[in-house]
């Protein structure tokens, strides 16, 4: 039963991370768009914020996937 609980925890952690990353990404874009600079000057910051946010999310997802694989292989 403990393994099933851990797998459920990983699943909910993934969902929580995805939602949090999306909200952080929207906040970053909103903050950048509030600047007085024209959009063409804001684009690199938007791209960097997007790459950083989803790069970190991908790394965390890979870690959770690795953890889930280790748990399921022990069964």
Image (cartoon, helix red, strand yellow):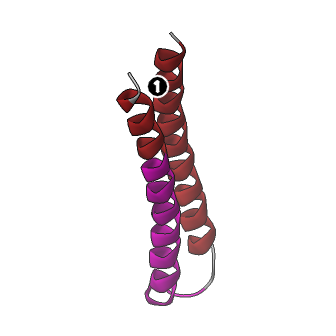
Q: In terms of depth relative to the viewer, which is nearer, 47 or 75?
A: 75
Most common SS among magenta residues: helix
Residue that lies at the very extreme toward the top in this rendered image: 1
Q: In terms of depth relative to the viewer, which is nearer, 17 or 6?
A: 6
Tell me: residue 39, above or below residue 67. Answer: below
- Left or right of 33? Residue 39 is left
Q: Position of residue 8 (x, y in %)?
A: 48, 22
Give the residue pinned by disc 1. 7
Q: Quadrant of residue 28?
A: bottom right
Which residue is rendered at x = 50% and y = 77% of the image?
48
Q: Position of residue 25 (x, y in %)?
A: 53, 59
Say if the magenta span includes residue 58.
yes
Say if the magenta span includes residue 9.
no
Total labels drawn: 1
Tell me: residue 29, above or below residue 6. Answer: below
The 10 Å Cα crowd at callout 1, few under 14, some 14 to 19, many 20 or more, is some
Secondary structure state at the residue bearing disc 1: helix
Tell me: residue 75, above or below residue 54. Answer: above
Q: Quadrant of the C terminus?
A: top left
* Residue range of the region highlighted in magenta in the rendering: 37-63
Q: Quadrant of residue 9?
A: top right
- Left or right of 23? Residue 68 is left
- Left or right of 6? Residue 68 is left
Which residue is rendered at x = 49% and y = 75% of the image?
46
- Left or right of 43? Residue 31 is right
Q: Position of residue 44 (x, y in %)?
A: 47, 85
Which residue is rendered at x = 52% and y = 70% of the image?
52
Q: Position of residue 54 (x, y in %)?
A: 46, 61
């Amino acid at each position: 039963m403990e393994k099933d609980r851990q797998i459920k925890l990983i699943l909910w952690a993934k969902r929580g991370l995805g939602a949090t990353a999306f909200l952080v990404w929207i906040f970053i874009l909103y903050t950048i768009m509030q600047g007085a600079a024209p959009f063409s000057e804001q684009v690199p910051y938007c791209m960097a914020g997007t790459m950083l946010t989803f790069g970190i999310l991908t790394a965390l997802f890979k870690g959770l996937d690795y953890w889930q694989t280790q748990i399921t292989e022990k069964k």
